[in-house]
């Protein structure tokens, strides 16, 4: 029964071998194609690109055409004062074409076009931010899943070792040279380690599902992760990072666009102080036919046709509106001051966060180096302990302590590796370089 449990656990632990391979770069590629946040923001870019047109800004004329057809009956046979006491049938067909063109509206058309361009740029920056967040999220989710997989591998080593020790002790007991206490101790260790594997497999499954969610894949999709948790240690200079962040950070760029949009709203509001010149042109045409079937009528049918052309210029100038425009401009100027204050606040906050992340990166680099050395020591210590335990120089409790120290050192190493990769990814995101780095 114990053999069956052991092999089932090994199967659960390494069932990912038959899954599709997934590298970090492939995960990012899938995420850029399928992530819902990216797809939504790209749709907004399409909308704003479509609206960024001179016609939308009001520069182009508007042309309308109308057609109409009317039918009526006029019975004048019982009208004593009618000069034509007959039953008439009237048919009229009319049409008109009208052109309306705003020639000047206080530079509002140009201001509208600039604002449309800024709205398009804002939507593109929002899409860039979504891409950055997605890449950052995929990196963390991928390495989180990889860390869970590596910890599962560590637990497999422990389970395999526990099983070997239990089997050896069982053989000794069968031939009468074993100690019952040691046999029970190894059996207990095997069950404990097997339980840990089951729980670790659950953590791995949850991490894979989270990765699928960020990538936009089916959450039940299984992967075999091929990229290694291997941090690249690079010397980083805070002054350089700060300069890059202030130049490239997408949040800062978006805030600059918000300021520019408010300034354009001010320009649009001020355009109301200027006159508006419109040109209107068109033509009207109508065709009518009057007919009667009365034999006494002097004329049975009569037709008429009219054709009119017109071309007009109009000048509108707002003399007084109760100060509404001036109050609106003043409110926008105050809003512009608010935007400037928010920019200063955001910049200070980002510099503060960058400093924290930078120092955390430096600290995690040192921790990574220390945990790497500690793991190498624990590996050597475990190998020595195996020999000593077989020679009877240490008991099962001592060996278990060394075994747990090895497991703890391995978990700490993978956690330190993940933490360092997380800090590095966050620095890349804050400095606007996470897209170029992939």
Image: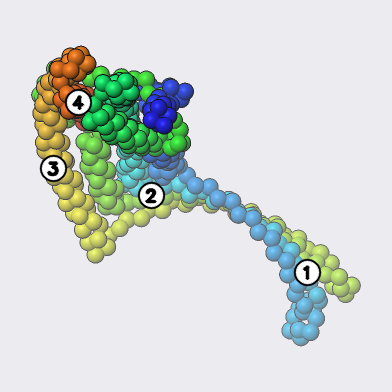
Circle 4 sits on which residue?
Answer: 396
Within the image, what quadrant is residue 6 found in?
Answer: top left
Mark 3 touches mark 2? (CB < 8 Å): no
Mark 3 vs mark 1: in front:
3
Taking depth in this image into account, of 79 and 138 the one nearest to the observer is 138
Within the image, what quadrant is residue 229 found in?
Answer: top left
Q: CA distance from mark 3 to mark 4?
A: 60 Å
Whether residue 365 is visible: no
Q: Earlier in the sequence, mark 3 or mark 2?
A: 2
Circle 3 sits on which residue?
Answer: 345
Q: CA distance from mark 3 to mark 1?
A: 78 Å
- Under circle 2, the secondary element is strand
Q: CA distance from mark 2 to mark 4?
A: 97 Å
Q: Earlier in the sequence, mark 2 or mark 4?
A: 2
- Under circle 4, the secondary element is helix
Q: Earlier in the sequence, mark 3 or mark 4?
A: 3
Circle 2 sits on which residue?
Answer: 277
Within the image, what quadrant is residue 47 found in?
Answer: top left
């Amino acid at each position: 029964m114990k053999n069956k449990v052991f092999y089932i656990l090994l199967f659960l632990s390494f069932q990912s071998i038959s899954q599709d391979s997934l590298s970090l770069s492939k995960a990012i590629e899938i995420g850029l194609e399928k992530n819902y946040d990216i797809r939504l923001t790209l749709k907004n870019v399409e909308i704003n690109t479509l609206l960024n047109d001179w016609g939308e800004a009001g520069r182009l004329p508007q042309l309308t055409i109308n057609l109409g057809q009317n039918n009526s009956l006029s019975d004048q046979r019982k009208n004593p004062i009618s000069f034509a006491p007959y039953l008439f049938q009237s048919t009229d067909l009319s049409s008109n074409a009208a052109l309306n063109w705003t020639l000047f509206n206080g530079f509002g058309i140009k201001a509208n076009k600039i604002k449309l361009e800024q709205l398009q740029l804002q939507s593109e920056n929002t899409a860039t931010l979504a891409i950055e967040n997605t890449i950052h999220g995929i990196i963390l989710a991928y390495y989180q899943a990889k860390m869970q997989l590596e910890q599962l591998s560590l637990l497999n080593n422990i389970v395999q070792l526990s099983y070997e020790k239990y089997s050896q002790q069982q053989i000794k007991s069968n031939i009468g040279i074993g100690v019952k206490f040691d046999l029970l101790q190894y059996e207990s260790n095997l069950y404990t380690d097997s339980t840990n594997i089951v729980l670790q497999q659950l953590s791995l499954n949850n991490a894979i599902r989270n990765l699928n969610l960020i990538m936009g894949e089916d959450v039940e999709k299984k992967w075999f992760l091929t990229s290694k948790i291997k941090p690249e240690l690079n010397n980083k200079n805070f002054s350089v990072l700060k300069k890059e962040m202030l130049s490239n950070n997408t949040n800062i760029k978006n805030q600059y666009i918000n300021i520019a949009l408010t300034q354009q709203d001010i320009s649009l509001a001020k355009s109301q102080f200027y006159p508006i010149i419109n040109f209107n042109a068109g033509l009207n045409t109508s065709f009518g036919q009057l007919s009667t079937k009365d034999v006494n009528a002097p004329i049975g049918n009569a037709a008429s046709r009219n054709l009119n052309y017109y071309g007009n210029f109009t000048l509108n100038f707002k003399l007084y509106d109760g100060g509404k425009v001036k109050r609106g401009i003043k409110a926008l100027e105050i809003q512009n001051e608010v935007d400037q204050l928010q920019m200063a606040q955001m910049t200070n906050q980002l510099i503060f966060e960058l400093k924290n992340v930078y120092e955390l990166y430096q600290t995690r680099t040192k921790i990574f180096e220390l945990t790497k050395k500690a793991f190498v020591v624990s590996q050597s210590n475990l190998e020595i302990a195996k020999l000593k335990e077989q020679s009877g120089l240490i008991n099962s409790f001592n060996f278990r302590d060394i075994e747990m120290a090895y497991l703890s050192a391995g978990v700490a190493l993978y956690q330190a590796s993940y933490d360092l990769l997380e800090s590095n990814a966050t620095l890349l995101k804050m400095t606007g370089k996470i897209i170029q780095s992939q």
